[in-house]
Every structure is written in structure tokens, then in C-alpha cells.
Image: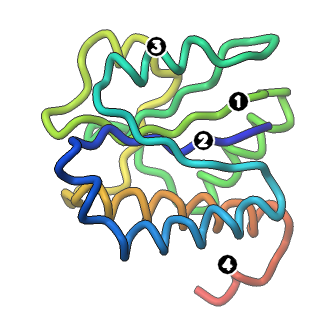
């Protein structure tokens, strides 16, 4: 399984992200030790959806959209969900942070799961880091690494 963290960010935001980009890159590097992972930024929702539907594989990419109305999972439940997807043969998992004004009905229809990081509103860049950390945490839970046990 390959995992891609995606976000829709306006061009003006992309230039002000050095600190969060370093953190994001660190968690992606850590995650890559157990599951291939990368990050992509898109200018528009339409560009993301087009890219998502063009991903190669026997089955379409599994899409998780971050949405305030989505399911709230514990770290353990998130890890279990990723483990089930991996074990069920999912080839591509895409976790996406949407546009500032929310996902369109088209994106909601394409989503396989809506996920919420909680009831707080986070800036996109911070949400990207939180999502990357939780993904890394999930891989440590799945592999029995002690990172998570120190909480």
C-alpha cells in the first residue's frame, strides 16, 4: 500500500510554510520506514479529484477526506482502520485536507470515508502536520513500536 497526504492550498499559502513543511517531511520520512508515503499539494479540489481518479492500480484509490462532520477516531482506531485497508489489499490510500470553504458534494460522493481530527478548527498547514503525525503514530501502533506507548 502507498499512502499520499494531500491538501488543497492557495498559492499564497504555499510560500509561508517552511516550519510546517519541515515537520511534515520528518513524519513522512518516519512513516516511509514501514509504509511508502508522500505528500502532494493541489491548487483546486477539481485538480485533486482528477489526480485521484488517475491513480494506477487494480482498484481505485481509497479516499479519506478530512471534514469537520467526519468520524472522530482514536489513534488506535485510526491505526486499526489503516491496518485493515492494508490487509484487504488497498494499493493506494489518499488522505486529503480540503479547501477552506469545505468539500463539494462531488468530493463527498467520491470519498470512501470522512474523518475529523476533532471539533477544533485547525489551519491547513497545522492540520497537515497533525495528520502526518497521526499516520506515523498509526504505523508505530501497527508494528508494535514503543512511540505510541509513551502517551
- Circles 2 and 1 in contact, beta carbons < 8 Å: yes
Tell me which residue sits at (37%, 34%) in the image.
42
**Image mark for residue 92:** 1
Tell me which residue sits at (83%, 59%) in the image.
34
Determine whether the residue tagged by mark 3 lies in a helix, strand or loop. Answer: helix
What residue is pinned by disc 3?
A: 50
Q: CA distance from mark 4 to mark 1?
A: 25 Å
Splitting the image into 4 quarters, where does residue 11 fall?
Answer: top left
Give 13 or 53, whichever is nearer the viewer. 13
Q: Earlier in the sequence, mark 2 or mark 3?
A: 2
Position of the N terminus, as image quadrant, is top right
From this view, report whether residue 104 is shown above or below residue 40. above
Q: Earlier in the sequence, mark 3 or mark 4?
A: 3
Determine whether the residue tagged by mark 4 lies in a helix, strand or loop. Answer: helix
- Residue at the extreme left: 101
Position of the C terminus, as image quadrant, is bottom right
Splitting the image into 4 quarters, where does residue 143 fall?
Answer: bottom right
Q: Mark 3, mark 1: which one is toward the viewer?
A: 3
Residue 71: x %, y % from top left: 41, 41
Give 8 or 143, whichever is nearer the viewer. 8
- Circles 3 and 1 in contact, beta carbons < 8 Å: no
Tell me which residue sits at (46%, 13%) in the image.
50
Q: CA distance from mark 2 to mark 1?
A: 8 Å
Q: Earlier in the sequence, mark 4 or mark 1?
A: 1
Q: CA distance from mark 3 to mark 4?
A: 35 Å
Q: Earlier in the sequence, mark 4 or mark 2?
A: 2
Q: Earlier in the sequence, mark 2 or mark 1?
A: 2
Determine whether the residue tagged by mark 1 lies in a helix, strand or loop. Answer: strand
What residue is pinned by disc 4?
A: 148
Amino acid at each position: 500500500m502507498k499512502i499520499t497526504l494531500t491538501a488543497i492550498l492557495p498559492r499564497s499559502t504555499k510560500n509561508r510554510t517552511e516550519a510546517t513543511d519541515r515537520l511534515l517531511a520528518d513524519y513522512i520520512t518516519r512513516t516511509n520506514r514501514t509504509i511508502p508515503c508522500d505528500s502532494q499539494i493541489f491548487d483546486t479540489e477539481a485538480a485533486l479529484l482528477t489526480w485521484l481518479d488517475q491513480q494506477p492500480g487494480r482498484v481505485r484509490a481509497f479516499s479519506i477526506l478530512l471534514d469537520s462532520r467526519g468520524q472522530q477516531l482514536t489513534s488506535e482506531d485510526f491505526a486499526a482502520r489503516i491496518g485493515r485497508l492494508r490487509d484487504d489489499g488497498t494499493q493506494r490510500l489518499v488522505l486529503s485536507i480540503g479547501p477552506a470553504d469545505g468539500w463539494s458534494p462531488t468530493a463527498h460522493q467520491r470519498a470512501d470515508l470522512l474523518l475529523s481530527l476533532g471539533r477544533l478548527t485547525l489551519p491547513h498547514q497545522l492540520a497537515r502536520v497533525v495528520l502526518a503525525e497521526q499516520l506515523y503514530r498509526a504505523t508505530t501502533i501497527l508494528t508494535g513500536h514503543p512511540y505510541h506507548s509513551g502517551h
